Image: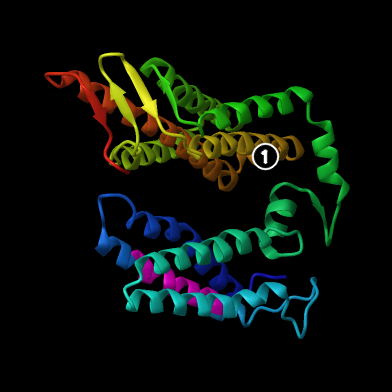
Amino acid sequence: MQLTPVIAIHLSAALAATVIGPFALWARRGRTQRPRLHRALGYAWVTLMIATAVSALFIHGNNLPHIYGYGPIHLLIPIVFVALFGAFWYLARGNIAGHRRTMQITYVASCVVAGGFTLLPSRYLGQVLWGEWLGLLSPGAARPGMLAGILGSTPFWVWALLAGLLILGYSQTRPRQTSPTRTLAMPLAMGALSFYGTISALGTSVPVLAGWLLSTVLAVACMARLPATGGTHYDAIRRMIELPGSWVPMLLILGIFLTKYSVGVGLALRPALQQELAFALPIAMLYGLFTGLFAGRALRLLRLVLAAHRSPAPTLTPATQA
């Protein structure tokens, strides 16, 4: 499949919708409502989804089972239109919960799940990622044994590290009490691991460090504007933080591990990728995003602790509902 103008429009609209979607959903969550931002991003997301669905009507594939070029993935086209109609129908009737639920399901199904299918080796983005970038595909055909060989040759300690990280991430999903030092240790350690992954794999060139720093600063700035997660308390008398369970640390930990593993495999297969800015800069910015999110979470907890110690009579300080 070649990059035609229709495919370019389809990919651009789909990628933009994937990026904008979480921000549109976030603008309507928590105690601080941002209706104007939510409305603007929502209309932009709907427009992009319509452009994605309409352009998909003119994209035909012959590699998967199909009828006149239309395969199973094309079933998402009517689903998207029905879902969007239903979301606005709920909104018109004042059913905000139904509107939110429909939009969330539509985003996951159309952007996350369907987006994953675009990375199949038979599709354009899959050919770019697995073939041109990682070199896992031979010209015109996939080599199915390649990934199995990579997984089989991975050292045992890597899987042991993954198991330890999964245990650490799972421990963060349970409500717990801990001291400020221990609470800050994990975000700072994972942030340091993210930074180490950047410089060890991509070097210390100015574009790489600048991309990492910019992404880190933006992530920290966004996180710093948010209050601590609802249910977070600091007892200044006992000097203990009560934390609710959260799956966010698990996702961030897995993100860092999978990024480092994928980059390591890619550089082992094609060392020249390290010198290609189109490869190194997005990876550096992704690492910076992880670093900034961990640092931002640590900063929010530190701000909660400092606020409690500055108060005249230290008491149990509840965090504002996120």
Q: Tag 1: residue type?
A: Ser
- Locate residue 135, reporting x and y percent: 76, 48
How many labels were placed on the picture? 1
- Locate residue 215, reporting x and y percent: 42, 40
Residue at image x 69%, y 49%? 133
Residue at image x 67%, y 24%? 161
What is the magenta segment's predominant secondary structure? Answer: helix
> Looking at the image, which is closer to me, 127 or 274?
127
Residue 320 in the figure: left or right of residue 169 = left
Residue 11, compared with residue 201, is above or below; it is: below
Question: Circle 1 sits on which residue?
Answer: 262
Instruction: Find numbered disc 1 in the image and state the secondary structure of the residue it sits on.
Output: helix
First to last magenta residue range: 41-53
Task: Inspect this view and state whether residue 300 appears.
Answer: yes
Magenta-span inclusion, residue 43: yes
- Locate residue 201, reporting x and y percent: 61, 31
> Looking at the image, which is closer to me, 36 or 227?
227
Residue 318 in the figure: left or right of residue 4 = left
- Assign the C terminus to one quadrant of the image: top left
Residue at image x 55%, y 36%? 250
- Assign the N terminus to one quadrant of the image: bottom right
Residue 84, compared with residue 306, is above or below; it is: below
Residue 302, compared with residue 290, is above or below; it is: above
The quadrant where residue 128 appears: bottom right
Residue at image x 27%, y 27%? 304
Task: Inspect this view and state whether residue 203 appears.
Answer: no
The quadrant where residue 240 appears: top left
